[in-house]
Image (tube, rainbow, N blue to C red):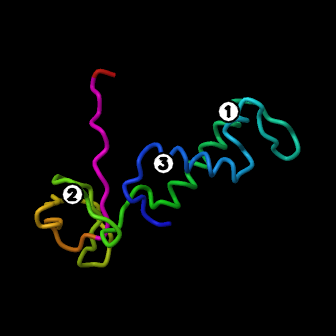
Amino acid sequence: MKGMKGMKMENMFELLRKKLDEARFPITDLKQGITVNGIQQTDDAVLYERVLQIVDEIEAEYDNGWIPVEEELPKKDGMYIVATNSEHKECRVSTAFFDVKDNAFHGVGILAWQPYPKEYNVSQ
């Protein structure tokens, strides 16, 4: 299950719910608290930390959003964040243009990609 493959947000929530259930921490039971070392915990901070741990596990499982080019390519023309293989065999992060017509990135040694995040809202 490597690579997010452009996972939609609702799919990410479903995966989070599944991981919470697997951790015996059903999302519907958040208000009831969880048991840590035999002690019932209802403190929001404890619940929040456990949810963050589960999110970290999901991110690690899905390569932090990197999509290997051999698994999937973008569906739209545009600039993307890419991981490339350098001449020194080091992985570098850069940007590259993807051309749907050519079905290829304009760049060399591209191993994986991910879309740009949403733009920063300066009014906040």
Q: Earlier in the sequence, mark 2 or mark 3?
A: 3
Q: Magenta stretch: residue 115 in it?
A: yes
Q: What residue type is disc 1 on?
A: Ala
- Tell me the residue at 30%/69% (across/down): 69
Q: Nearer the viewer, residue 100 or 113?
A: 100
Residue 95 as seen in the image, left or right of residue 48: left
Query: Which residue is the extreme one toward the bottom?
Result: 88
Query: Which residue is at the far top?
Result: 123
Q: What residue sits right under mark 3 in the picture?
A: 11
- Circle 3 packing at 10 Å, graded few (<14), some (14-19), many (20+), is few
The residue singled out by tag 1 in the image is 45
Total numbered labels placed on residues in the image = 3
User: What is the distance, in whole Å, between disc 2 and disc 3 at their CAs?
Assistant: 26 Å
Looking at the image, is 83 positioned above or below residue 120?
below
- The tag on residue 10 is none
Q: CA distance from mark 1 to mark 3?
A: 26 Å
Specify few, some or many for label 1: CA neighbours under 10 Å numbering under 14, 14-19, or 20 or more: few
Please report the bounds of the magenta region as a residue range.
111-122
Q: Which residue is the extreme one toward the left?
A: 101
The earlier-in-sequence mark between 1 and 2 is: 1
Q: Nearer the viewer, mark 1 or mark 3?
A: 3
